[in-house]
Image (cartoon, grey):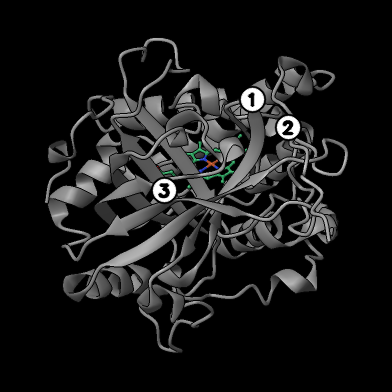
């Protein structure tokens, strides 16, 4: 039986198509975010991230790019076998601090240090970092800028109501097309009510939207690899979970053991079936599976010392545009993120009077 070699879509600038009124849509998203951000600041007198405000552990480790990858996977920072130090922040999606008893999508932000290549962000040309921002669901239900603006307006409208925020974010992460019903938040869709509240370390985390992958186009994920984290997949939090249950689970875990995850890449094989301008459409793994490119190793460590938490929450920034041109984020949802992350981080750093730095050495992250 002969194997038909898959054809991978080649990256060209022409793959991206700007939406009608996209600039005005993005203005409206960013303005709404800043209003919510300011409201949350006024409540706490401390600025948090506009999304993923609550951290649950900050880890140092490294990524080893696999040797002998097939050509289509040997791209960008994965072009040749290399070891990159990483700092990683685990979070939940709301832009405020809610109890961990309220289920919320989980985030894993990874910063690779010492990467080669032209950097995307103006003013950060000297940086040598590649950020990967991942959430534990393969798609984002509001997958383009105009749809996202509707979500953002709902979040603003319900900023004082953690339960409504939970439903909105659960719908964004898990709702798919049904999530559109959520635009009448008074009658939220039932399937978001049962969103699982599982152990954060057993989750698989996805870029949700596409990035340039050197000569090609891809989505990226990080999946549990070592047995100890694979055993946590689908494990619900205990019934009497505390407000900071996720932090406690992460800290307890890493006090005695390390963990491994695998970075995998799903290459686009058909731009119609696997679009980049609508990140709500799942790229079918039967058409193109996630293929391993690197191993992420996180040794046993103290995951949430006071100094480390303050550094990660107030000084560090993760940004999908912090990285090399070979991994440029793609699609209107990604273009919206250019100004969203800049605005959120500027506000946070200015209000907390912290320097906006890009690290180049893991020693800068306190133990
Ligand atoms: C497309 C899929 C997306 C993923 C996978 C994602 C993931 C993440 C993650 C993991 C974080 C936490 C980073 C950290 O630990 O510092 C984060 C923060 C944030 N996200 Fe997203 N996000 C997505 C889409 C968006 C969109 C569409 C917007 C807005 C247009 C947005 C706005 C933000 C903002 C403002 C922050 C806080 C930035 C800061 O203050 O430093 N995200 N996101």
Mark 1 or 2, nearer chain start: 2
Left or right of residue 64: residue 338: right
| Proximity of marks 1 and 3: CB atoms separated by less than 8 Å | no
Residue identified by numbered label 1: 335
Q: Is residue 33 visible?
A: yes
Mark 2 or 3, nearer chain start: 3
In the rendered image, residue 52, in percent from the top left (x then y), is placed at: 46, 49
Left or right of residue 193: residue 190: right
Q: Which mark is residue 66?
A: 3
Q: CA distance from mark 2 to mark 3?
A: 35 Å
**For discs 1 and 3, the disc positioned in front in the rendered view:** 3
In the rendered image, residue 165, in percent from the top left (x then y), is placed at: 60, 57
Identify the residue at horizontal 62%, vertical 59% (top origin): 137
In the rendered image, residue 257, in percent from the top left (x then y), is placed at: 22, 73
Residue identified by numbered label 2: 145
Left or right of residue 209: residue 69: left
| Of 104 and 79, the residue lying toward us | 79
């Amino acid at each position: 039986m002969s194997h038909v070699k898959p054809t991978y879509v080649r990256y060209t600038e022409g793959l991206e198509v700007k939406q009608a009124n996209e600039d005005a849509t993005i203005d409206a998203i960013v303005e709404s975010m800043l209003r919510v951000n300011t409201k949350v600041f006024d409540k706490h007198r401390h600025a948090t991230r506009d999304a993923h405000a609550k951290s649950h552990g900050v880890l140092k480790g490294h990524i080893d790019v696999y040797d002998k990858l097939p050509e289509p996977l040997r791209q960008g920072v994965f072009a040749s076998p290399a070891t990159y130090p990483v700092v990683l922040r685990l979070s939940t999606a709301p832009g405020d601090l809610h109890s961990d008893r309220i289920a919320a999508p989980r985030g894993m932000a990874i910063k690779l240090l010492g990467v080669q290549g032209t950097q995307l962000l103006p003013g950060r040309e000297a940086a040598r970092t590649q950020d990967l921002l991942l959430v534990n669901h393969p798609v984002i239900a509001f997958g383009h800028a105009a749809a996202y603006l509707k979500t953002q307006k709902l979040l603003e409208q319900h900023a004082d109501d953690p339960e409504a925020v939970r439903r909105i974010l659960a719908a964004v992460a898990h709702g798919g097309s049904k999530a559109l019903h959520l635009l009448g938040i008074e009658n939220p869709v039932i399937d978001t009510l049962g969103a699982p509240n599982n152990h954060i370390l057993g989750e698989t985390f996805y870029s949700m939207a596409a990035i340039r992958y050197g000569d090609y186009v891809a989505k990226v994920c990080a999946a549990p690899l070592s047995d100890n984290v694979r055993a946590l997949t689908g494990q619900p939090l205990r019934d009497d979970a505390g407000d900071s249950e996720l932090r406690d689970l992460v800290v307890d875990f890493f006090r005695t053991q390390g963990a491994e995850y695998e970075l995998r890449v799903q290459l686009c094989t058909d731009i119609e079936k696997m679009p980049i301008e609508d990140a709500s459409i799942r790229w079918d793994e039967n058409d193109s599976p996630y293929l391993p490119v690197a191993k992420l190793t996180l040794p046993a460590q103290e995951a949430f010392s006071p100094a480390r938490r303050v550094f990660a929450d107030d000084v560090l920034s993760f940004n999908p545009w912090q990285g090399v041109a070979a991994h440029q984020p793609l699609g209107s949802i990604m273009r919206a993120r250019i100004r969203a992350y800049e605005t959120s981080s500027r506000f946070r750093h200015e209000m907390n009077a912290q320097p906006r730095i890009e690290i180049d050495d893991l020693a800068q992250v306190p133990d």
